[in-house]
Amino acid sequence: MRDGKVAIIFKRLVPNCIMKAKNERRKQYIGSQIDDCKDLSGIFYLLPFQKGYLVNWDVQRQVWEHTFGKDVMNLEPEDTNAIIAEPYFDFSSIQEAMNEIYFEEYNFKAILRTNAGTLSAFKNRQEEPNQLCCLLVDCGYSFTHIAPYYNGKKVGSAIRRVNIGGKVLTNHLKEIISYRQLHVMDETYVMNQVKEDVCYVSLDFFGDMKIAKLKGQENTIVRDYILPDFSHSKRGYLKQDDTKLKPHEQTVRMNNERFAVPEILFHPSDIGIQEMGVSEAIVHVINNCPTDMRPHLFKNILLTGGNAMFPGFKERVESDVRSMAPALYDVRVTKPVNPITHAWEGGKLLSTSKNFSSLMVTRDEYNEHGHSICWEKFDV
């Protein structure tokens, strides 16, 4: 946002990492530069975030400089307001370092630091003004957060974090495919695509497991996935039943892996992680809220994050929560059109609201008051 007017109204996803390819170790790809890489096999990642928290500032700076630079956004920070999404309960040292970098290094005109879930809850509040309460489920890469909101404000004492996300699922899929079929432990990028293209959340786990044990055409679950070879194709795809494999094509057979991998979100103990599943955690959070809020939270559960894209995820959450909720309460689960960018859309909406300027901290205010004004204004 520049000088009070929205200058960039499109969304562009930039991977928050640096990647290096197996055959080009000296060259690194920052953020969206990965589109220029010709061979994505054996690619490995340098991640600024670990377990959901920013720990590698050198990597993060390179991603920011690429994103703010001519290749992506071509920003002039001195004339730009920024909304920065942070995880719930972010460490105070990280928050203060964020203030210093954005104001002292990049010289942004003004910033607003908030939670991605708060932006999603704001958008939900604008779209459904009659709903005073919202239960935000952010099921992302490193973790899942469940946060209740009342009138746009989070109930901090009831927020829960489940240490299960897309990274755990991809790593588990790599392990079981490597054990059962072919070695793919170095193929994080490719196996993440396999997970996104083939896996789904089962509404009847044991019933699907019985079907997966059947032979031939009776097994309606099994699929062959053609892996990319990066000379003929850059992304894999599902093999059609009536097509023959070409000599250069290699496949992995996905049977019960299709639904057993996402099942970890609902039963982490299946792989030895002693945590509540997503549905159980939702009910646990609601039961820790004031009694008057509970029926309103049950009927406004909002799913965001990449894992909400799994087919059947919304229906499974709704079914599980319904079975655990009091019979008198209505249960309604909503999944946005794009759960990944929903927080961005909330931030875009917030940037056009009347009180947006009062939520931000300007560079002049920071220079005068330091971190204290940020602690006063930002509720992270």
Image (cartoon, grey):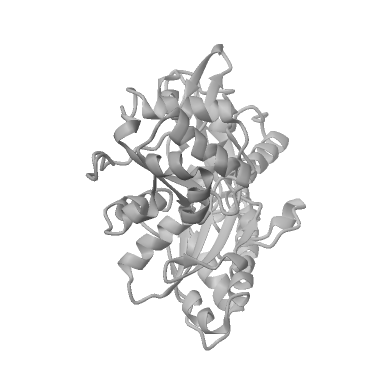
Kindly identify the residue that appears in the image at 54 percent across and 72 percent down. Answer: 319
Q: Position of residue 206 (x, y in %)?
A: 65, 64
Residue 370 horizontal side relative to residue 279, left or right: left
Kindly identify the residue that appears in the image at 49 percent across and 60 percent down. Answer: 312
Q: Position of residue 165 (x, y in %)?
A: 60, 49
Residue 147 horizontal side relative to residue 109, left or right: right
Kindly identify the residue that appears in the image at 76 percent across and 57 percent down. Answer: 274
Taking depth in this image into account, of 244 and 231 the one nearest to the observer is 231
Q: Is residue 358 above or below residue 171?
A: below
Q: Can you say which quadrant of the picture contains the N terminus?
A: top left
Q: Is residue 195 above or below residue 315?
A: above
Q: Residue furthest front?
A: 368
Taking depth in this image into account, of 325 and 6 the one nearest to the observer is 6
Image quadrant where residue 363 sits: top left
Q: Position of residue 351 (x, y in %)?
A: 31, 51
Kindly identify the residue that appears in the image at 59 percent across and 77 percent down. Answer: 323
Taking depth in this image into account, of 12 and 230 the one nearest to the observer is 12
